[in-house]
Image (spheres, rainbow, N blue to C red):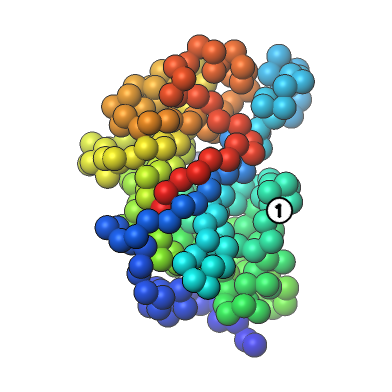
Amino acid sequence: MRVSLTRLLPMEGAEEQLPDICGPGAISLNGTLTFLGTGTSMGVPTLGCQCAVCTSVDPHDRRLRPSVLLRWTEAPPGSERVVVIDTGPDFREQALRERITHVDAVLYTHAHADHILGMDDLRPLSFISERRGGPIPLYADAEATKILEQVFSYTFSPDSTYLTRARVRLIPLAEHNTVLGVDFGRIPLMHGEQMIAGFRFGNTAYMTDVSAIPKTSFALLEGVEVLILSALRHTPHPSHSTIEQSVAWARRIGARQTWFTHIAHDLGHEETNRSLPGDIQLAYDGLSMPITL
Ligand SMILES: [Zn+2]
Ligand SMILES: [Zn+2]
């Protein structure tokens, strides 16, 4: 079957034709969220670094590039749905660790290298997806779409002659995105000078690479019970919040539990978590928790 490499309109996707049984105000589903990676862009240990965290023997101090995995079981026929937020350079290793055997959709927060470079590792999974009904939908805003099309031109160019390219299609990210019946609301966030996307799904929000949260975005976070927020280190950075800043936002949002991600090698897991309140903790790679979608 010939695969169209052009960007399809949202209405053309097979999954959009499914009844929206689990959107806002509808029946909720039980799902699981797993941290595929919790490290900053360089990963921890950082290459060439001999600091205490980079040489730590605590497995919690090994952090792959940031990404989360969501799984839920669809109402009859009961198939397992798998959605990934960002595919960083460690995606292949993360997918093997979490025994990911298929991916139904990917949502991108933004197109920095640590969030997109694993896109190509979707290839074998995308062949499975294609056999099941179509290419893997990749949700990305206009800026991220432009970069994905440049970086992976051999995948997205209509002139591509690369036969084993990923079977994926870009879908413009909307304010609300219904992915296999689950609503993923876009939460606008500032990452330095750039506006990027966080996501709200059911009782959970995923907000990485945040340096500022626009006032209007706080309203979109009302009722969030599980909050995932980036917190780089204690020292200020132009495009990432510090632990102190993220603690203040976590308190303002008031989730039952907040998990920090996108963590630099400045922060040792045990020591940092001892210094934080119990309802605000550093996450770690492989940490899994139930969520409601
Ligand atoms: Zn990042
Ligand atoms: Zn970034």
Say which amino acid is labelled 1. Answer: Arg
**Would you say the beta carbon of the disc 1 residue lies within 8 angstroms of ligand 1?**
no
- Characterize the local packing of mark 1: few (<14), some (14-19) or many (20 or more) Cα atoms within 10 angstroms: few
Residue under the image location 47 percent in, 49 percent down: 110
> Which percent across, then down, holds residue 227?
41, 36
Residue under the image location 58 percent in, 74 percent down: 135
Residue under the image location 62 percent in, 77 percent down: 132
**Closer to us: 186 or 143:** 186
**Closer to us: 248 or 257:** 257
> Which percent across, then down, holds residue 214?
27, 38
> Which percent across, then down, holds residue 42?
64, 34
Quick check: can you spot residue 242?
no
Specify whether 223 is left or right of 238.
Answer: left
> Which percent across, then down, holds residue 137?
51, 67
Residue under the image location 37 percent in, 74 percent down: 19
**Closer to us: 231 or 4:** 231
Q: How many marks do you count on the picture?
A: 1
Quadrant that contains the N terminus: bottom right
Question: Which residue position is annotated with label 1?
Answer: 99
Q: Quadrant of residue 38?
A: top right
**Closer to us: 208 or 95:** 95
The secondary element bearing badge 1 is classed as loop
Q: Residue furthest bottom?
A: 1
As displayed, is residue 132 above or below residue 83? below
As displayed, is residue 60 above or below residue 113? above
As displayed, is residue 19 above or below residue 117? below
As displayed, is residue 251 above or below residue 86? above
Quick check: can you spot residue 107?
yes
